Image (cartoon, grey):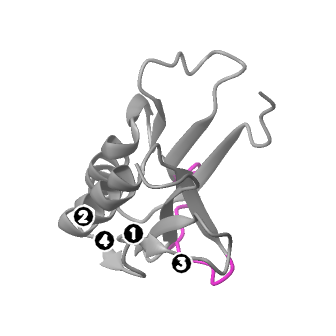
């Protein structure tokens, strides 16, 4: 399998609040926190060694704590996490709302993308557009 993106870092305004959100939202997708450094938290698939060059990772935080600036979501930024089933998309969506996220499109088919595209869309506590998507037939 080829990896297109090695890692993504997303700036947040309140790391503990965002960690609670992403811990809850990503758990149904099998993605867990794997590393914590001053000012950031890293996530990877459960059971994956994040130092493995074939691993992909997602980080939240703010890289320069001394020059911390307010993080504002970009209207053009959208982050989609691949789910293993429609049920995982549903669980991501519900966990996201319970952990401080906002609805940005309930889980469902989006045939305008392709016939089996099943996605659930939320805004994280900072307003970033986040999605879980499953590309297969029904579970």
Q: Give the residue at mark 4.
A: 101
Q: Assess whether mark 1 and mark 3 are in contact (beta carbons under 8 angstroms).
A: no
Q: Which mark is residue 94?
A: 2
Residue 30: x and y in percent read 39, 35
Q: How many marks?
A: 4
Residue 127: x and y in percent read 44, 77
Residue 19: x and y in percent read 32, 49
Q: Which residues are magenta?
A: 62-76
Q: Give above or below for 15 relative to 73.
A: above
Asked where in the image residue 34 lies, by quadrant, the reply is top left
Q: Which one is in front in this view, the residue at disc 3 or the one at disc 1?
A: 1
* Dot 3 alpha-carbon crowd within 10 angstroms: few under 14, some 14 to 19, many 20 or more: few
Mark 3 and mark 1 lie on one chain; the one further toward the N terminus is 3
Mark 2 and mark 4 lie on one chain; the one further toward the N terminus is 2
Q: Which one is in front in this view, the residue at disc 1 or the one at disc 2?
A: 2
Mark 1 and mark 2 lie on one chain; the one further toward the N terminus is 2
Q: Give above or below for 116 relative to 111.
A: above
Secondary structure state at the residue bearing disc 1: loop
Q: What type of secondary structure mainly makes up the magenta span?
A: loop
Which residue shows up at 39% across the image and 69% down it?
Answer: 124
Placement of the N terminus among the 4 image quadrants: top right
Mark 2 and mark 3 lie on one chain; the one further toward the N terminus is 3
Left or right: 9, with 76 as reference point: left
Q: Give the residue at mark 1.
A: 124
């Amino acid at each position: 399998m080829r990896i297109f993106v090695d890692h993504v870092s997303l700036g947040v305004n309140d790391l503990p609040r965002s960690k609670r959100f992403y811990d809850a939202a990503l758990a149904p997708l099998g993605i867990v926190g794997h590393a914590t450094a001053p000012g950031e938290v890293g996530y990877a698939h459960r059971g994956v060694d994040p130092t493995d060059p074939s691993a992909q990772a997602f980080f939240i935080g703010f890289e320069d704590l001394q020059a911390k600036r307010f993080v504002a979501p970009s209207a053009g930024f959208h982050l989609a996490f691949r789910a293993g089933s429609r049920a995982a998309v549903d669980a991501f969506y519900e966990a996201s709302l319970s952990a401080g996220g906002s609805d940005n499109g309930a889980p469902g088919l989006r045939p305008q993308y392709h016939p089996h595209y099943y996605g659930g869309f939320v805004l994280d506590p900072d307003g970033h557009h986040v999605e879980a998507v499953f590309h297969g037939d029904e579970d």
